[in-house]
Amino acid sequence: MSLQTVRPNLKTLLILIAAVTLYRLVMLHVASGQIDLYADEAYYWHWAQHFDFGYYSKPPMVAWLIMIGTTLFGDTFVGIKIMSLVVYIFTTLNIYFLAKELFGDEEAAFWSGAAFITLPAVWLSSLIISTDVPFLFFWSLAMLFFVKALKSDAWRHWLIVGIAGGGGLLSKYTMIIFVVSAFAYLATSPTYRRHLKNPKLYAAMALAAALYLPNLWWNAHHHFVSFVHTARDNAHVTGIHFHLNKMLEFLGSQFGVFGPVLFGWLLVLLPRYRRFQESWKLLWWFIVPMFGLILAVSLLSRAFANWSAPMYVASTVLVAVYLARFHKRWLYAALAVNVLMGVGFYHLHDITKTLGIELSRKDPYKRVLGWREMGERLSKIMARYPHAGLLMDDRKAMAEMIFYVHPHPFDALKWNPRHTLRDHYELTTDLQKHIGEDFIFVTERKAIPDVARRFEEVRPLGVIRVPLYKDFAREFHVYYLKRFKGYE
């Protein structure tokens, strides 16, 4: 069956979603025996061991999703990640109904949904549990019911906007840009400007704020660490210094995450604002503020590819609808390229093996390899010292080891002589409270004079080395530390 013979309707989209999701589920199961958790996933899984309204660097929604997945499927590779697949089903349907609401066109709605579920970013993100997963769901839900509310002015639609807004804020703080986009659109829209005086709009905002309040309360009781982390470690803008190379790097990454054809067309369409009709202008306002902000951040500091994630919702609809109406062959090409990119990424190791290509440390899978073996070998060492706790000095490695060492060392501590608050472990653990205790210290450092002088005895236990490529091996040094004397 060719793309030209596809009947573009909801039934066909549901079949496509089911087929893609089933394939991704199979690949997730296969991956569970070939790769390991990404460090941030292990980090979030540790958060999910106890319910809370906030965690060190993120609002709580990602941890809550992991709680659901692991409750159903256990503390496993699949259980931790499974909710990504589930949530993307509903996000795709939100985008379908958003396009249909805006354009009254089932064909446009179908191609919008099909384009979204085959975005390279969604191929990747579907097999990773991250804050973007619930964030995109709530953003797309808020957009859908914002459009409905503008048309109907029904209380139920405005309230769902508020609920989605609150859920978005509990997923990622950049949900606040939704408010900027909404107000900018209303201020420039002769058709809907009247809603700026609509009390229902402000009731929806109040509801979103009320739903978000528990996380604000949590931050208030934890030194506002989430906000400090976002301002300091994410944006990292320390002055007016231009980094054109970083901005170009960010732009280049968008061709990868949105797809080279779709992003190329997006850049063509965005300057055409004055020629757009009302529905197109609404989409434009839910793209440009976020895009402009991240471009500015990338110029002043640096920006990661996924930071622009909210604009994917409106961008997908804008480009897919335009191409479906005026350049369908380009749309077919865009979807084909994106599917090839997604499937190619899933089977990268199979492809390189077939072609006889030897991978190096530049392998994109490098960060999710070697941790399981590292954990198994460390488990054997720790079993010989049952009264010693686990001590580490790197947040990512610590998250991986807490997951892959058995039994899970949930009481692991972070080496933090400066008493900083730069990650969840520094926030929640304090080695100073464990004077006189023994530890197994795991570090990438070959020499630890600063650590050694704070213990009565230090005994090297060897090196755990896991070769991954001819030019890279994961390597950690292990020490037995006896009787901690205190940082001072």
Image (cartoon, helix red, strand yellow):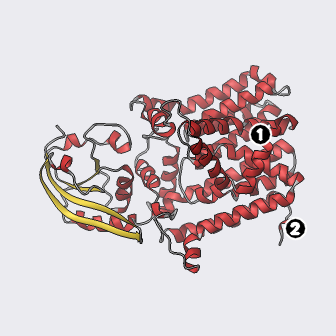
Looking at the rendered structure, the secondary structure element under dot 2 is: helix
323 with respect to 372 (left or right): right
Residue tagged by mark 2? 5
Q: Can you give x and y, in whole percent of width and height, for residue 48 in the image?
A: 44, 49
Q: Which residue is mark 1?
A: 283
Q: Is residue 157 left or right of residue 252?
A: right
Q: Extreme top residue here?
A: 197
Residue occupying the point 56% across, 46% down: 304
Please, what is the three-letter code of the amino acid marked with disc 1?
A: Leu
Along the viewing direction, whichever of 310 and 207 lies nearer the viewer: 310
Left or right of residue 21, residue 280 in this image: right
> Reading the chain from its start, which is encountered first: label 1 or label 2?
2
Q: Which mark is residue 181?
A: none
SS of the residue under disc 1: helix
Rate crowding at label 1 as few (under 14), some (14 to 19) or many (20 or more) other CA atoms within 10 Å: many
Q: Residue at x 26, y 68 (%)?
A: 380
Q: Write the residue at 26% across / 41% down.
A: 430
Q: Nearer the viewer, mark 1 or mark 2?
A: 1
Q: Is residue 108 above or below residue 230?
A: below
- Near-viewer residue (26 or 185): 185
Q: Tell me the quarter of the image containing the C terminus.
A: top left
Identity of the amino acid at label 2? Thr
Q: Compared with residue 87, is residue 173 higher up or lower down, i.e. above or below?
A: above
Examine the rendering and report whether any part of residue 97 can be seen. no
Q: Quadrant of the N terminus?
A: bottom right
